[in-house]
Image (spheres, rainbow, N blue to C red):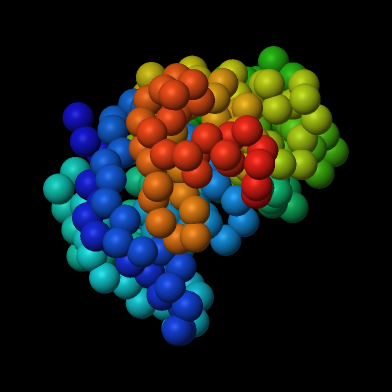
Amino acid sequence: MVKFNIKNLSIWFGSILALKDCSLQVLSHEILSVIGPANSGKTTFLRMLNRMNELQTNFRMSGSIELHKNDINKLDVENLRKRVGTVFALPLPLPMSISENVSYGVKMHGAKNKSKIVDIVEKSLKQAYLWDEVKDSLATSAFKLSGGQQQRLCIARTLAVEPEVILFDEPCSGLDPISTAKVEEAMVKLKEYYTIVLVTNNVKQAARVGDRTAFFLNGELIELDRTDKIFTTPSDARTDGYIRGKFG
């Protein structure tokens, strides 16, 4: 089933064309890896899926993005960002306890039942593969966690509001290999319940976790295919060159 249907999407920031005539579909319960060098348009594409580009000045777009056949520009933006959550490159825990970090968004959306909130915190931390490490220190400041634990806490905070889609924007860029492996393990398990779009500068990570991979270059979608095909027999020489490290 199609989760996002993107047609002829172009994005400008002032006079700069950041994304040119992009058309693709994101499928339900897949991990779509998005790769490409700096300024390729991959992050602009990701941020468009929950309208974060609107926060920048001089933004304009043409084309369309549908979420379950609904034009996202006609949806309430707060509700859209609840349905389409984001995990950023740098973990950004709130200055409060581990438990309060996870429950923050739930409470903001009106939840008041304490026992239900406790259950949501536990479920979300388990899905983010963090529960076993923090279950005895939920009242501790989130700032006492390691960088990798903070990133998984941010994943748990996103999961707590029950999104349909999770956008990962280079979530492991500052993490050590062990923490990276735990985040990747969480992503692979989470696709059973969510649709995941992963922007990564690590082509090996894209190969490890992606069901399909999209390659962007100079603001254009060059190629989109099954990950195994992209990494073995890509259709475009530019894709092959990037994967082999010839540029980027």
Q: Is residue 221 left or right of residue 148?
A: left
x%, y% of residue 146? 82, 34
State the residue at coordinates (72%, 38%). Answer: 150
Q: Which quarter of the picture shows residue 184?
A: top right
- Quick check: can you spot residue 28? yes
Residue at x-position 55% and y-position 47%: 36
Farthest left residue in view: 69
Question: Which residue is at the far front?
Answer: 237
Image-based side of 155 in relation to 146, left or right: left
Residue 28, given in percent of the width and then of the height, sits at 29, 30
Pick the front one: 206 or 189? 206
Q: Residue at x 55, y 30 (%)?
A: 206
Work out whether residue 118 can be spotted.
no
Which x, y percent locates residue 72? 25, 58
What residue is shown at x 38% (from left), y 41% (from top)?
Answer: 223
Is 143 located above or below residue 63 in the figure? above
Task: Out of 217 and 201, give the one closest to the viewer.
Answer: 217
User: Which residue is at the front of the view, 77 or 132?
Assistant: 77
Residue 76 to residue 204: above or below? below
Quadrant containing the N terminus in the rendered view: top left
Q: Against 94, is 206 above or below?
A: above
Q: Name the spot of residue 230 as percent of width and height, x first.
A: 45, 28
- In the figure, is residue 141 to the left or right of 107? right
Total number of numbered discs in the rendering: 0
156 or 230, which is in the foreground?
Answer: 230
